[in-house]
Image: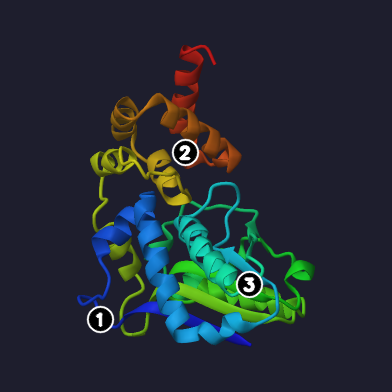
Amino acid sequence: MNIRYSLHHIRSEDEFTFSPEEYSYFKYGDTSYAEKFAKELFDGFIAAHQELLETEKEIILLPSPYMAIPTASNFLCFHFKKHLDFYLFQQAKKSSILSKINRNHTYTTDYGNLSFEDRKNLIANDTYYLDKDFLRGKLCIFMDDIRITGSHEYTVNKILEQYGVQGDFVFIYYAELMNPEVDPKIENFFNYYAVKNAEHIAEVMAKPGFQFNTRIVKYILSLESGKFDYLTSVIRKEQKDLLLELAISNNYHLIAEYENNINTLTQTELYYGY
């Protein structure tokens, strides 16, 4: 079995059944919307496919691939798991298991601006790792926040087929582009709808539910020096410390475009005696 479910269907460039503003904040680390979206997504999924959870197979949840810094969709997946596990508890079934798709490379390219072929070619230069033996024979739920061209789904299916992994596979999305006539760049319309500059980033980072994710870390590290200096002057020291830690963990210090801002963070740490 290999099926797909999406809660919201995008059919035009100007009519949506979800809030672009909320989605934009979600993409830049406001996890209160990850929690909201997860509840909506779980309720929609149960209404459409409750029978899938009647299985006796173990249920594995796999959010979108990442190296060391989770993506926004990982927080969506974490909250989805809470609702799924409570449902399974009510059915006297075992809880789901959270797994991971590892990736070995990162890139500075703005994914939301790419076509399907460009996305597929970009991913082809990456390396995804799935624990094929662990997934075999299980109900595997692959989760992402939005499906625009299907390039990630294509890549995951290719890996599953390549290694002959037999199981039940479900791809779940909060939203999906259904109209091939709509330019894939609409993804960045949603991404940047409410978060467009360093001042907006500072506002998001001041929210109580803020958590760093891959997108916001890359955005901050790519800021020109004046805007970067502004941002680092208004956020908390703990956030600057964590930003540096995450940047290093994802090997961003090896990317030329991020080098100056990471060095600035490092000098700040040295100034404070770390």
Task: In this rendered view, identify the residue nearer to me: 240 or 238.
Answer: 238
The residue under label 3 is: 92
- Counting residues from the start of the chain, the first of labels 2 and 3 encountered is 3
Task: In this rendered view, identify the residue nearer to me: 191 or 224.
Answer: 191
Q: What amino acid does circle 1 point to?
A: Ser
The residue under label 2 is: 258
Q: What amino acid does circle 2 point to?
A: Tyr
Residue furthest left in the image: 14
Mark 3, secondary structure of its residue: loop
Judge left or right: residue 24 versus residue 61.
Answer: left
The residue under label 1 is: 12
Vertical relation: 47 (above or below) 234: below
Q: CA distance from mark 2 to mark 1?
A: 36 Å
Q: Position of residue 271 (x, y in %)?
A: 46, 13
Q: CA distance from mark 1 to mark 3?
A: 42 Å
The quarter of the rendered structure image containing the N terminus is bottom right
